[in-house]
Each structure stands twice: as C-alpha cells, then as structure tokens.
Image: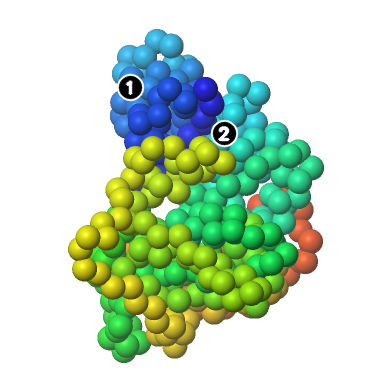
C-alpha cells in the first residue's frame, strides 16, 4: 500500500489522480492532500478519502473555513511551508506534484531531496530548477517520473532501448485552438477564443499556454533536464488528433511511440504503478473505427513562443526561472484583457533578454529572480 501526497488536488490533474486512487484503493492510499484556497472541494475530498492531513496553502482563508466540513481523522493545516513538510514526510511514499506554476517548486525540491518517488505533473518544477531537482534526486535516490502526457510517452518509449541509444525525441502538440490560423487572424484573439482547446480539458493557464505553444516551449526545457538531452536532440511536431503523445527515435532509425486517447489518467497511473502496469482506468483505443494520424511541422512565425523554449534549453542557468515567471504573469494579464495575445511572447522575450543571467544559480537566487521577473512583467508595456 503506497501512501500518496497529492499536492494540488482540486485542479484537473488532481481530479484525475483521485480517479486513479478510487480505482486502485487496494494499492494506493491518500495520506496527505493540499489545495490553494478551495476549502469546500478539499473538504469533500477528505470526507471521501479520509487522509490524515489536509493543507490549504492560502492562509488568508483560515477564518472562512468551516472546520466541521472536514472529517475528525483529518488534521487541517495552513500555509505553503506545511506543504513542503508534507512532501518530505517519512509517512509519504509518492508525491504527486500537481500545484500549478512556480508555487510547486519548493515542495517538489523537498520531495526530491527526501528520496521520494516524485510524479511530476508540474512542468514548471523542471523548467525553473531542472538541474537542482535532478541533482537532488541523484544524491537521495529519488525517482523522477513524468506525468505530462508527452514526457510520460517519452519515458515509456525509452524503455525500448538504453539511454545511450537514443538519437532524438519528438514531442507532439495538438496545435491548440488556433492551429491553421495565420498570425494576422489571431493577433486580436480574445481570452474566450484562446480557451477553447480542441482535444484537452485543462485549467485556464495551461490552455492559454497551449494556444501560444508556450506549453510546448516549457516541455522542451523540461525534457532537456528530465532526460539529460541536448536541445538538438529535441523536436516538436503538430499532431491534431492527440493520439500519439510523443515518440523516441533510436540510433538504428527505429521510432517507438506511445498511443492512447487523450486521457490524463493513463500517465498519472503509470507514474504511480511503475514499473508495473495495472488494469485500465483511462479510456482505450478503438481500432475498429476508421481514423488517421497527421503530423505537421510547427509554424514558428505564427507561434514564436516555441522558439523561446529552445533558446532557454540552450542557455540553462536562470533563464528557465525568468521565462516561467514572465509567462505566468503575462498569461494572467492576457486573461484580464490587459495585454494582447502576442504580447505574451513579447513580454517574455524582452524580460528574458535583459535579466541578470547566472549559469549555476542557487535555489535562493532562482526564487529571487522569479519575484523580479514577475514584477517586471506586471509593469511591462507593449
């Protein structure tokens, strides 16, 4: 029975993780769970799963919480520092890192240092501090298992050969809601248009990232550190059907891909069950119906944000932290109609180009630059 800490339980990844826990209650138990401020949803989760510990990161909601909504066996705590302690607790076997954005970095690093299996649904962890996370895992013996569908696909396909035999990896992209549009057509796109993803149901931030292809830029950076690759070994293709979740090309020319319907429960379950494969929770492929799989090169003129991912993967150092922070704030400003669609990419590029770059930053330096970049992006004007 593996004891799970689910960090970020009320988002889309958290909800899918709970489905996996329900299906495999004989193997997995929810020991600790966190949310940002939605105490009603957190209380409902606690009433069903009866974890020993529940945490609300936002301490300002302390006075609004109805403590009677939580079961008596669940201790309720407040504050992000409590989440970090939970991630490193000896009572936890697997940490599911599903907190959105850089807010999940400290707890992910704590889990890696404590030697946990870290199921990484928060790509920002590797974007901001990939080398620190990898080194911490190397020292402690922690397992880093990706939950992103693309990186899970790469991880699964890599089982077909040794790491030294990998020639390159190819990350697939749905293309988002603006696939096939020209730059002029989407220059004045509204948040409502950008939030209409054709194949995935996700939170607003990652859905906007999919529209700009910034999500793929961040995935390039994540893959660089997670799989110890050179940027030249990483490619991106647009695959509208979202069935091939990514593939690996080996030195002999063989290409191994992972296919499944777009259902996040599959990569989540694999991160929890590895190296075993358990009975399916996610939907299955139906090969009895006619279908086709298409692949197109990305349009870098229309979606320039993707170039930022390769630039940052080459630079390393503090650039990932700055790009991630700028993007989070720029997306928020776009959703508030404060800046335009293409201002997201431009703000990130402007601030990235002038930040005080360091090649081997400490965790404290990354945190400080994250704060600096957020302030710069709030003040940025086109």
Which residue is at 76% across, 50% downward?
Answer: 135
Disc nearer the start of the sequence (1/2)? 1
In depth, the one of 109 and 21 nearer the eye is 21
Disc 1 target residue = 48
Q: Residues within 10 Å of mark 2 (few under 14, many from 20)?
A: many
Contact? badges 1 and 2 (CB < 8 Å)? no
Is residue 333 visible in the rendered structure shown here? no
Disc 2 target residue = 94
Q: Residues within 10 Å of mark 1 (few under 14, many from 20)?
A: few
Quarter residue 92 falls in: top right
Is residue 249 visible in the rendered structure shown here? yes
Quarter residue 64 falls in: top left
Q: In the displayed structure, would residue 180 be above or below residue 86?
A: below
The image's mark for residue 212 is none
In depth, the one of 311 and 30 nearer the eye is 30
| Residue 296 horizontal/vertical position (percent) | 40, 82
């Amino acid at each position: 029975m593996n004891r799970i800490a689910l960090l970020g339980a009320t988002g889309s990844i958290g909800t899918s993780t709970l489905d996996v826990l329900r299906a495999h209650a004989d193997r997995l138990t929810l020991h600790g769970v966190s949310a940002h401020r939605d105490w009603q949803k957190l209380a409902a989760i606690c009433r069903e799963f009866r974890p020993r510990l529940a945490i609300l990161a936002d301490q300002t909601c302390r006075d609004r919480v109805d403590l009677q909504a939580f079961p008596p066996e669940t201790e309720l705590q407040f504050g992000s520092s409590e989440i970090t302690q939970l991630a490193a607790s000896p009572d936890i076997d697997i940490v599911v890192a599903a907190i959105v954005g850089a807010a999940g970095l400290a707890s992910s690093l704590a889990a890696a240092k404590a030697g946990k299996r870290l199921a990484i649904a928060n790509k920002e962890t590797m974007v901001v501090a990939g080398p620190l996370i990898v080194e911490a895992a190397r020292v402690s013996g922690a397992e880093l298992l990706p939950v992103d569908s693309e990186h899970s696909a790469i991880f699964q396909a890599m089982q077909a050969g040794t790491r030294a035999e990998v020639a390159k990896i190819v990350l697939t992209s749905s293309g988002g809601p603006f696939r096939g549009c020209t730059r002029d057509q989407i220059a004045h796109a509204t948040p409502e248009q950008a939030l209409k993803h054709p194949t995935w149901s996700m939170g607003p931030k990652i859905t906007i990232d999919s529209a700009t292809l910034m999500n793929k830029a961040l995935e390039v950076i994540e893959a660089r550190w997670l799989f110890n690759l050179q940027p030249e070994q990483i490619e991106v293709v647009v695959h509208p059907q979202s069935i091939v979740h990514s593939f690996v090309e080996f030195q002999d020319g063989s290409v191994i891909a992972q296919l499944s319907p777009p259902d996040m429960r599959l990569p989540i379950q694999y991160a929890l069950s590895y190296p075993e494969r358990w009975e399916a929770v996610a939907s299955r492929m139906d090969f009895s119906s006619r279908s086709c799989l298409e692949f197109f090169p990305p349009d870098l003129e229309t979606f320039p944000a993707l170039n930022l991912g390769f630039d940052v993967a080459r630079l390393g150092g503090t650039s990932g932290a700055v790009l991630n922070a700028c993007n989070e704030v720029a997306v928020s400003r776009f959703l508030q109609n404060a800046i335009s669609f293409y201002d997201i990419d431009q703000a990130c590029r402007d601030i990235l180009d002038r930040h005080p770059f360091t090649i081997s930053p400490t965790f404290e330096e990354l945190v400080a630059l994250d704060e600096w970049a957020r302030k710069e992006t709030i003040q940025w004007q086109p």
